[in-house]
Amino acid sequence: MLEGFFDRVECAATRGDLQSLITDLRDHYGISHIVYHWVNSDGEQWGVGTYDVAWAEHYVKSGYLRVDPVIQGCFQRFHPVEWKRLDWSSKAARALMTEAIEWGVGNQGYSIPLRGPKGQFALFTMNDSCSDETWQGFCDANVRDLLMIAHYFNHKALEFAMPDEEKVQKQLSPRETDALTFLALGYSRAQIAETLDISEHTLRVYVESARFKLGAINTTQAVARALSLGLIVV
Amino acid sequence: MIRYIYADELHKFPRLAGSMFRDRAAQFRDRQGWDVKVNAAGEERDEYDDLNPLYVIWERADGTHGGSMRFLPTVGRTMVNEHFASLIGGGTVESPEIWECTRFCLAPGAEPRVSAALMLAGGEIMTGFGVKHFVGVFDARMVRIYRLIGAAPDILGTEGAGREAISVGLWHFSPRLQMKVALSAGISAELARSWFERAFGASARRSHAAA
């Protein structure tokens, strides 16, 4: 499913497309909510996601941005945040959580901070109602895909929101090009590492980096994208 | 103990932060002869310190700096991508799963276990934040220190020679290596985990034994 998801993000042309993508992604993971939340430096907000629209409007109207520990905990940070690790001790924060739960927001959350040009800041949040242990299992099993999805989603949202920003087509580095070319030729990782005279660990880093630049969920899709974009020739 | 501090919170630890930046001057300018900027207070700072990086710092009992390193995500601006592209064969390294580790520094006379403790802290970051790889800028001395504790980085490229040599490399981390490094540091995995939790908040997931 995720390969198809990445292809659809690539083709997304409207905010409605992003909304239906994020809904499908939520259904795929079988959790309560997934939300993409953009916050401008002047406090302006927009987003797509599966929260009740009325809750999202209420959140904005009530100025919860200023008291939300998730926002406070992610702004100026670059590590993903588990909600349970945040400071919910203030009265305002506890009231926010109580109210959110009444609107169907789950008690467990995992938010990935995202940044783009000109101080752009957004959050990609997974949310559910479940035990700590279940949530831990979900996060551990999916963090890798979710990091990639979150960044790719933000990349697409930036295209919509800042159409005037010059779009820079990601360039593969020479070593990334080599790695993907040999993968496309069907070499094993061990063979490629030997051929390029690098360790398999180093090879993994080049493949990871290429995968991110190409917006691919896995190596197979990265190779396919590189081929179709003419970045590698076999 | 190990502290994890973003730049915007360094002001809460003036003694620790001040001694870190001064020790960086001692290491990078005085000992290694790198062409770095040192301000009137004797502190070495560069443009990447202004990007709100995450510092991992060994704090001594007296509150001063014993050793440190600096992390930035490679999806943003990094030193490797902006200054050392030639050492990685050109181009950039970018991924949410790869963080950059630079300004690896030990205070003059730091005990050997400090570098092992910092390495353990790197492992905590990987486990806690879904990071798979660190790409770092190392000097020759650091490469030697890590080889000694059995955690030599993969060198992607080197410029310069002797004590002025600068390498770009990759840090490995695995549970097996963690055990080995924990032994070198004389610090249990549980203690390393508790320092991480103290910085980033405890949660249920941390009750599990070291990954």
Image (tube, grey):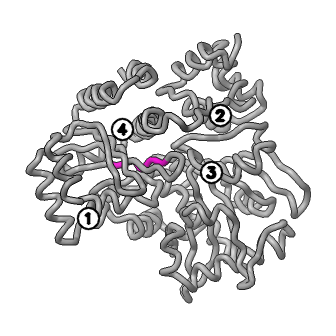
Label 4 lies in what chain? A
Amino acid on which disc 2 is placed: Tyr
Residue B77 badge: 3
> Upstream in the sequence, badge 1 or badge 4?
1
Is residue B109 visible in the rendered image? The answer is: no
Q: Is residue A147 left or right of residue A95?
A: right
B114 part of magenta stretch: no
The Cα–Cα distance between marks 2 and 3, rounded to whole angstroms, is: 18 Å
> Upstream in the sequence, badge 2 or badge 1?
1
Over which residues does the magenta segment extend?
A111-115
Mark 2: few, some, or many residues within 10 Å (few <14, many ≥20)?
A: many
Which type of secondary structure does the marked residue at label 2 adopt?
helix
Q: Nearer the viewer, residue B201 or B45?
A: B45
Same chain shared by disc 4 and disc 2: yes
Residue furthest right as drawn:
B161
Residue A141 badge: 4
Q: Nearer the viewer, residue B205 or B16?
A: B16
The Cα–Cα distance between marks 1 and 4, rounded to whole angstroms, is: 30 Å
Same chain shared by disc 2 and disc 3: no
x and y percent of residue B184 in the render? 61, 65
Label 2 lies in what chain? A
Label 1 lies in what chain? A
* Location of residue B139 with respect to B97 vertically, above or below: below
Q: Residue visible at 34% across and 52% down?
A: A44
Residue on which disc 1 sits: A67
Residue on which disc 2 sits: A206
